[in-house]
Image (spheres, helix red, strand yellow):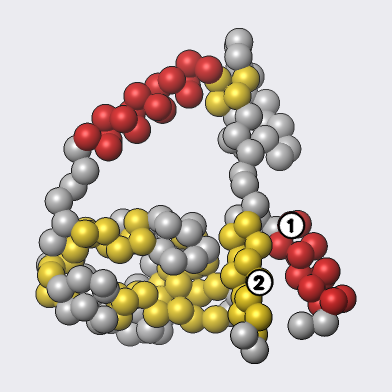
Amino acid sequence: MEFENLLTLIKTVSDSELTDFDYEENGTRIRLKKKKETVVVSGASSNVPVMGLENIRTVENVAAVNTANTQADNSEPEGMIVKSPLVGTFYAAPAEDADPFVSVGDQVKKGQTLAIVEAMKLMNEIESDFDGKVAEIYVENGQAVEYGQPLFRIV
């Protein structure tokens, strides 16, 4: 990849809402990752939106979220979770008019296609890492997904 193209790529990812980008060409791999900021505000909060600070949390809300996360960790659902390997758009079927790859209750085999995640105009098949039955589908067709976001629960 040429240096000018690399600089353009870095700027594009920096300006976007992507948090993770991975690219490989001719044995060269580029991985860009940026952290999202979470701003903690103490005191009274206002309902006035502030551009760029969508993740504002008061100290009390942070404590409540941490308590809820701790409780959720203690009651993890049974089965294996299939997570999104990249940021993109989730598609449950190969085409708009087609049946979904899988539905709740379907038996699946390891390596079977469960869905597609579109990222940068590339369609990436999401395959099951497990044999079992689809117990839950966590996302809707056409929904944006993040890296590591749970998509399916297989039991």
Q: Amino acid at mark 1?
A: Ser
Compared with 90, 55 (above or below) is: above
Question: How many residues crowd mark 1 within 10 Å: few (<14), some (14–19), many (20+)?
Answer: some
The mark that comes first in sequence, 2 or 1, is 1
| Label 2 SS | strand
Residue at the image point whose x is 83% and y is 69% from the top? 7
Question: How many residues crowd mark 2 within 10 Å: few (<14), some (14–19), many (20+)?
Answer: few
Work out which residue is located at the far top of the displayed protein and give it.
43
- Left or right of 153 on screen, residue 19: right
Q: What residue sits right under mark 2 in the picture?
A: 30
Compared with 48, 120 (above or below) is: below
Q: Does residue 118 appear in the picture of this structure? A: yes
Work out which residue is located at the far front of the displayed protein and give it.
27
Q: Amino acid at mark 2?
A: Ile
- Nearer mark to the viewer, of 2 and 1: 2
Q: Nearer the viewer, residue 5 or 138?
A: 5
Q: What residue sits right under mark 1 in the picture?
A: 14
Query: Residue 89, position in %: x, y?
Result: 49, 67
Work out which residue is located at the far right of the displayed protein and give it.
4
| Label 1 SS | helix
